[in-house]
Image: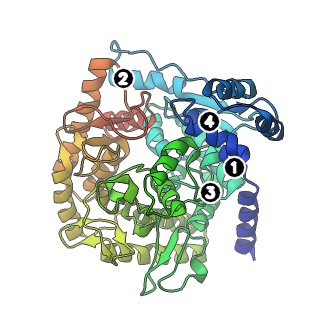
Amino acid sequence: MIRPLMLALASLLVAASPLAPSQRFGKLFHEVQMRRLFPDGKTFADAQPRRSDAAINAAFARCRCGDDATLKAFVLANFTLPVVPAAPPPARKLGVAAHIDALWPQLTRTLPTVPAGSTALPLPRRFVVPGGRFREMYYWDSWFTMLGLQASGRQDLVDDMIADFGSLIDRYGHIPNGTRSYYLSRSQPPFFYLIAGMSQDRATLEQRTRWMRTEQDFWMTGAATLKPGGEHARVVRLADGTLLNRYWDDRAAPRDESYREDVELADATPGRNREQLYRDLRAGAESGWDFSSRWFGDGRNLATIRTTRLVPVDLNSLMVGMEQAIAANCATLGDRPCATRFERLAATRAAAIRRYLWNADGFFADYDLDHRRVSPVRTAAMAFPLFTGVASVDQAAATARAIGALTGEGGLRTTRVDTGQQWDSPNGWAPLQWIAIHGLRRYGANAVADRIANGWLGSVSREYAASGKLLEKYNVVERKPGGGGEYPNQDGFGWTNGVTRALMAGR
């Protein structure tokens, strides 16, 4: 009875979650975003109401806000806009490692309470934000950031962030994409088992394991009653009964933080079902790869995005890691039935990855639900089965060769295709460098791993010497700042700091 009761309580928590601003302010939100009163759609999504939603909506209904100036005056009278934090000053006099150590306090926030109506989600302890426009704690960003915190000797902040993530699971039944109300309908790649494993406090093992099991329940919601060939939210069951996961979002509407971009894309794509397009865009955001040719039906255009029709190799590899970690924790706690169950789940999923997510050309890739075959698209996600130890020895060797072909002078490219999207070539991203480096090292492919590590550190150091900045992403082909996507390259920057600092520490 205990597990069903926990699931019922989790459902109640999610049902009570705060609404997104687009749901609260309807037509007003639509007008502000579509008329582009602010260059960055995230600005109004993060704005703080000065009075109740009902009062603001009633006033807007009476407002003659036909021109942009009047509408903007209305917004400024009824909302407090977020303050854009100043970028850290260039620091060429410090070495990269010393500069990163000095950045942690600048990126640390506390938010135990929030004003009524805020889109921010409170957190009980300190946390580190990525920087730039990202003023809140993000899910998968944080593990890579925390790697650097540990290398900098900041276990105190690591422990605080573990508690923060646990509080999110307790309140909402899962970890949202980021700590804003408009992120609650989706999560991100499930790195919490690794985050929880960063604690050195044995006394909290039972609590951390409970959090991990709750997260696993979230990802597997609907699996128990799913028939062969069926799909529900984040779970799919193949025709032979194999159970795997996909990215999803519980809402099928424009993203609050990119509302105008999503609506305009739907308007320009009349042949597509709008709700499905929005769902696929949101699922792409849950993947963290927002956006990439990896998800595109034609391999080129965002309008063909079909994220929910693919079974991602990274997600399922992380699910193996999660299930293995739960099994190990349960064994330590003396809960043999739990340990046995999760050992079996992990082993079954790992076998399915080796079978269904392996391309005979020599690399891991996503499984296409519509075409019932593995994708031919080569991406840096192929490293995840090596990172979690899922790959066979032969598969790992072949994947190492394929990863080598994706590696430029400045590190590992995300894909081989240049579409102008930020999760495509020529961009390289800190988290994918770390996953590939450590996955390759796990199987003894040290030469390729070292090439990626040295190339990445070279990219970061070169740009730091030129501008004094640490960036969100880098062009690893030409070894310069990265580009593409829905917003400018951000300075700060959490996971770049974390991965770079950890690599420099020899981790």
Residue 88 relative to residue 409: left or right: right
**Identity of the amino acid at label 3?**
His
First in residue order: circle 4 vs circle 3: 4
Q: Which residue is mark 3?
A: 174
**Identity of the amino acid at label 4?**
Val
- Mark 4 element type: helix
Can you tell which of label 4 and label 1 is closer to the viewer? 4
Mark number displayed over residue 469: 2
At 70% from the left and 68% from the top, the residue drawn is 7
Gap between marks 2 and 3, in whole Å?
34 Å
Answer whether residue 19 is visible to the viewer in this image: yes
Front-lying residue, 181 or 37: 37
Answer whether residue 128 is visible to the viewer in this image: no
Horizontal and vertical percent position of residue 459: 25, 32
Please, which colouring scheme is shown?
A: rainbow
- Mark 1 element type: helix
Horizontal and vertical percent position of residue 444: 21, 57
First in residue order: circle 4 vs circle 2: 4
Can you tell which of label 4 and label 3 is closer to the viewer? 4
Q: Determine whether label 1 and label 3 are within 8 Å by CB.
A: no
First in residue order: circle 4 vs circle 1: 1
Horizontal and vertical percent position of residue 452: 22, 44
At 56% from the left and 51% from the top, the residue drawn is 254
Horizontal and vertical percent position of residue 63: 76, 32
Gap between marks 1 and 3, in whole Å?
21 Å
Front-lying residue, 125 or 466: 466
At 39% from the left and 21% from the top, the residue drawn is 98
Mark number displayed over residue 23: 1
Q: Which quadrant does the C terminus fall into?
A: top left
